[in-house]
Image: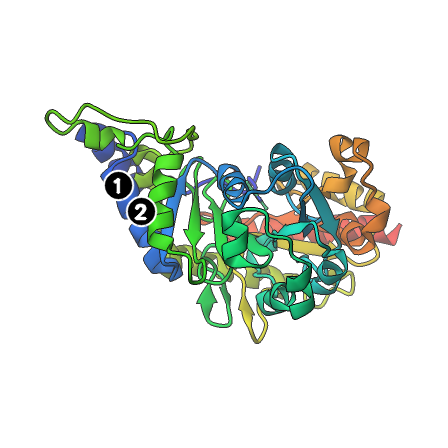
């Protein structure tokens, strides 16, 4: 069976983890701090905070911006449920909008959804393809939209507009107008979950890129305390001789990354651009070549004049396939020993969100894309022979179903 997205665990990763285990320091410490620094250098973001998951990072930033009851947060209907669940945790209302054919949030629909309750827009760089950030910033900076904005907290007054909080869970290393994600939106949240392009097993990071008068360095320092109980000294500082006394300055969270996990991230990041991304691009090119002449294949957009994907997913679409036909094709591909997936089941189709009154009928393009989508395996160790098995399984399965 060809797996869908196994992590790349080689001797280098194992050695680095063992080095941490033997160092006497396993939780947040020097390797986490180094990983943060390397991530900022890579992204071009002023500061990056490592954290235990992207989900925590999104919630941390929503709460920092004072999002709560009566507020609205705009996000695509087509994303993983974490993007919406955190809005619910804060007591605010998720406002879903439809996506375009690139699977990303449609700026025209965002503009229609904005009102005086809107506090945040959460674009999702689907599959690693960055959203149209110029269009999104044109909305939040528009004079009329700014006049609508009702600032209720000091942070909201300081920004004076809707916050652009990017769910960049998929898009580490992707670029938009020459900038890597992390240095485009106000804040960008990355995921290092086991299936993501760069993994630490579980983990995430928040890149802080807020405009003046915000001070990203002091925000970073404040967040380091906030993600560790609100304790004014971290565990490493407390190990210094006689440095035992500490204070709790706020009711903080427990969201810190451990050095064991950061050591995996350091190895992964070191070879990310020159090795991981090159291999992923090559795999996607093999898929493009196999399907480009098939009349039933709608190939995913990976590059445009402004935008370059980091190829987190290969979301193939089967032209005119109904949901049941796609499901049938998917099963036949599995029967040929190839693991495939669907990204994602849109949030308005989930029972919890249906129970709140959301209806997929309001997001026709999201449904159309979902119904015909099949994600193919993309991972570092995928071989040329395996790619051939995948493409043959897909072609045979599609042609069996769509011919009948
Ligand atoms: C994986 C994912 C998340 C959550 O990431 P975690 O690190 O598991 O919390 C959020 N949004 C999207 C779009 C994702 O794919």
The percent coordinates of residue 272 (x first, y second) are: 38, 55
Taking the spot 38% from the left edge, 28% from the top edge, the residue there is 229
- Tag of residue 265: none
| Residue farthest toward the bottom in the current orientation of the protein | 305
Residue 244 position by quadrant: top left
Q: Is there any visible trace of residue 337 in the rendered image?
A: no
Q: Secondary structure at mark 2?
A: helix
Image marks 1 and 2: residues in contact by CB distance under 8 Å: yes
Depth order, front residue of 173/320: 173
Q: Which residue position is annotated with label 2?
A: 35
Q: CA distance from mark 1 to mark 2?
A: 6 Å
Taking the spot 42% from the left edge, 33% from the top edge, the residue there is 255
* Relative to 291, 204 lies left or right: left
Residue 276 position by quadrant: bottom left
Depth order, front residue of 397/339: 339
- Tag of residue 31: 1
Q: Secondary structure at mark 1?
A: helix
Assess disc 2: are there few (<14), some (14-19) or many (≥20) residues with their C-alpha within 10 Å of its C-alpha: many
The percent coordinates of residue 64 (x first, y second) are: 50, 43
């Amino acid at each position: 069976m060809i797996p869908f997205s196994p992590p790349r665990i080689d001797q280098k990763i194992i050695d680095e983890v063992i080095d941490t285990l033997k160092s006497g320091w396993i939780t947040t410490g020097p390797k986490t701090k180094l990983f943060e620094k390397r991530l900022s250098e890579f992204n071009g973001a002023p500061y990056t905070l490592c954290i235990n998951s992207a989900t925590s990072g999104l919630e941390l930033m929503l709460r920092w911006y004072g999002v709560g009851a009566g507020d609205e947060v705009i996000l695509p209907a087509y994303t993983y449920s974490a993007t919406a669940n955190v809005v619910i945790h804060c007591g605010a209302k998720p406002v879903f909008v439809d996506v375009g054919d690139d699977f990303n949030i449609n700026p025209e629909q965002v503009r229609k959804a904005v009102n005086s309750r809107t506090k945040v827009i959460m674009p999702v760089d689907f599959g690693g393809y960055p959203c149209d950030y110029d269009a999104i910033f044109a909305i939040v900076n528009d004079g009329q939209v700014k006049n609508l904005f009702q600032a209720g907290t000091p942070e909201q007054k300081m920004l004076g507009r809707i916050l652009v909080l990017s769910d960049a869970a998929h898009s580490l290393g992707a670029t938009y107008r020459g900038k890597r994600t992390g240095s485009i939106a106000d804040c960008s949240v990355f995921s290092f979950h086991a299936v993501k392009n760069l993994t630490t097993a579980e983990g995430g990071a928040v890149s802080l890129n807020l405009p003046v008068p915000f001070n990203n360095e002091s925000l970073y320092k404040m967040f380091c305390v906030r993600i560790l109980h609100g304790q004014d000294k971290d565990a490493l500082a407390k190990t210094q001789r006689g440095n035992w006394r500490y204070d709790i300055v706020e009711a903080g969270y427990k969201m810190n990354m451990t050095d064991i996990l950061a050591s995996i991230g350091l190895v992964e990041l070191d070879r990310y651009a020159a090795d991981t991304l090159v291999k992923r691009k090559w795999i996607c090119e093999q898929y493009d070549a196999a399907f480009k002449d098939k009349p039933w294949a709608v190939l995913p957009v990976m590059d445009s004049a402004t935008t370059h994907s980091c190829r987190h997913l290969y979301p193939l679409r089967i032209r005119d396939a109904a949901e049941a036909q796609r499901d049938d094709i998917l099963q036949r591909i599995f029967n040929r020993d190839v693991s495939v997936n669907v990204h994602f089941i849109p949030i308005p189709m989930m029972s919890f969100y249906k129970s709140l009154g959301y209806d997929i009928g309001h997001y026709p393009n999201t449904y159309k894309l979902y119904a015909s989508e099949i994600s193919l395996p993309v991972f570092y160790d995928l071989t040329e022979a395996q790619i051939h098995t995948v493409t043959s399984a897909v072609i045979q399965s599609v042609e069996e179903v769509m011919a009948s």
